[in-house]
Amino acid sequence: MPMTQGNELRIVGFLCNWCSYGGADTAGVARAEQPTDLRIIRVPCSGRVDPLFIVKALLNGADGVLVSGCHPRDCHYSAGNFYARRRLEVLKRFLPALGIDDARFEYTWVSASEGQRWQQVVASFTSRVHALGEAPRLGDAKFSPKAAGTALPPPLRTLGTGKNAPLDSLKQAIKEKLPGLECVIGWQQGYDGAHTTPLFMRKTEDVDKLVWGPLNVANPAVYLPRFKGRKTGIVVKGCDARSVVELLQENLIAREDVTIFALPCEGTLDMARVNEKLGRYTTVGGIVRDEASVAITVDGREHSFGMAEYAQGKCRGCANPVAILADVTLGGAPEIHAGAPVPPELGLLDAMSLEERRTFWSAQMERCLRCYACRNACPMCVCRDYCVSDSRDPHWMTQEADVTQKLFFQTIHALHLAGRCTGCGECQRACPVGIPILALRQHIARTVEELFDNYKPGLDPAAVPPLLGYEMEEQNIHEREWK
């Protein structure tokens, strides 16, 4: 008979084979009274529990999920639960960003001899889930809350157009090193003067096509892993350089193969808003830059875009306008002001309640095309040929075009970037329907920063991303105890 009165709820438990499963068995042998809501999945180690298991369960109808493993320093595989502790703590703090109450997920440690402790754990967690009631379903959200406008935070530096950047000197430096490189990656004018596209400079005359300014929105670091093992050059902004450093951290490229050219970045335009203001047009008549704005003339009409208003949200909080790592750096570094502004996308998410976030993501995912442009544009998403979104063994996702599958993919992407995302914003920029998915990456990046000593990816080539390591005693993660 269940200890909790009322209907059973759907609670999933992932239990370590060596300790917690044995503890549950000990409680059963002792005939300890336990709730019947829990459905146990036996796993070899808590370190085997991918955070995606928990998210998949919660998005597909589970009312609660419990993970239990060996006590720290007592793992059958030495360190499995140390890795699990970091991943599961990050996930627990990330769930509210999806509109999921983090009280519906818990992780703890129970040894094989602690039958009484297991009874306390499962009874306490089940009671908590019953108090919350059945979990609301993402697909049941039929409206989108009116997004409260968030004021643009003051930038950490003066935003400009790069009009006075030493572009000619940069071109000369590239031409000098080009004979020893297979190519140098940069930007060139796109299909019209209001847009840029990647440029692969293989000959001297290609270098003359290089452009610099607020229209250089793409991150060229996305191409570097494809040139692994070949001598390659790359022109970077500050945020692009962080992506290069992160690729070096993970040994996805070799430092001796990459020559980095850098200029100080004064900011880039939010092309989604620029294109919205330009509307449909036939021809671009001209582009004029002063130090603070860009004027674009289309079909005889001039539109002005001030950098203070139209710069990408990421530019407002950028503290690294100059490349952290470079072989050739030209131009002076701008002054950085004190402060830590919350990015506009993240501020919008922070202003919502759990219910509002759930309905917000439901409405946004209805618009998603599942084109995977966000994945393909991400410089840290390097396993495209083996992406779990395409895998049928294991079959993580279906091809159904429902909001649950779409949000699950975005969660997969965000969790795979935990501790790795450099905030370049390429995922959101590449989205053809303008879904603010960068907010999920920014939320999880803030969580990693809070948990692991203000860690920011892409600043130190010798650093180890926090979810690829562990400490015996975690400073900001407390052991899960049940009274």
Image: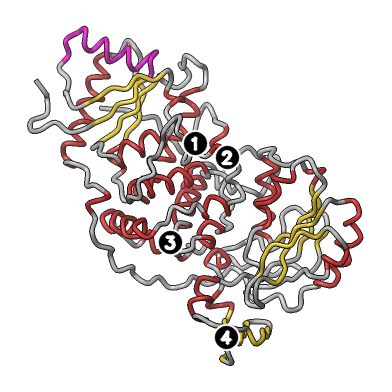
- Asked if the residue under mark 1 is in contact with the one under mark 4, i.e. CB atoms within 8 Å, the reply is no
User: SS at mark 4?
Assistant: strand
- Asked if the residue under mark 4 is in contact with the one under mark 3, i.e. CB atoms within 8 Å, the reply is no
Give whichever of 46, 435 is nearer the camera.
Answer: 435
For the point 27% across and 19% down, the residue is 118
Which range is magenta? 16-32
167 magenta-colored: no
> Left or right of 255: which side holds 293?
left
Residue assigned mark 1: 475
Q: Earlier in the sequence, mark 2 or mark 3?
A: 2
Q: Amino acid at mark 1?
A: Gln
Q: Earlier in the sequence, mark 4 or mark 2?
A: 4
The furthest residue to the top: 29
In the picture, residue 437 is in which quadrant?
A: bottom left
Measure the alpha-carbon separation of dots 3 and 4: 25 Å
Q: Is the residue 320 above or below the residue 9 in the image?
A: below
Crowding at mark 4 (Cα within 10 Å: few <14, some 14-19, many 20+): some
Residue assigned mark 4: 304
Q: Earlier in the sequence, mark 4 or mark 1?
A: 4
Q: Position of residue 449 (x, y in %)?
A: 52, 47
Query: How is the model colour-coded?
Result: secondary structure
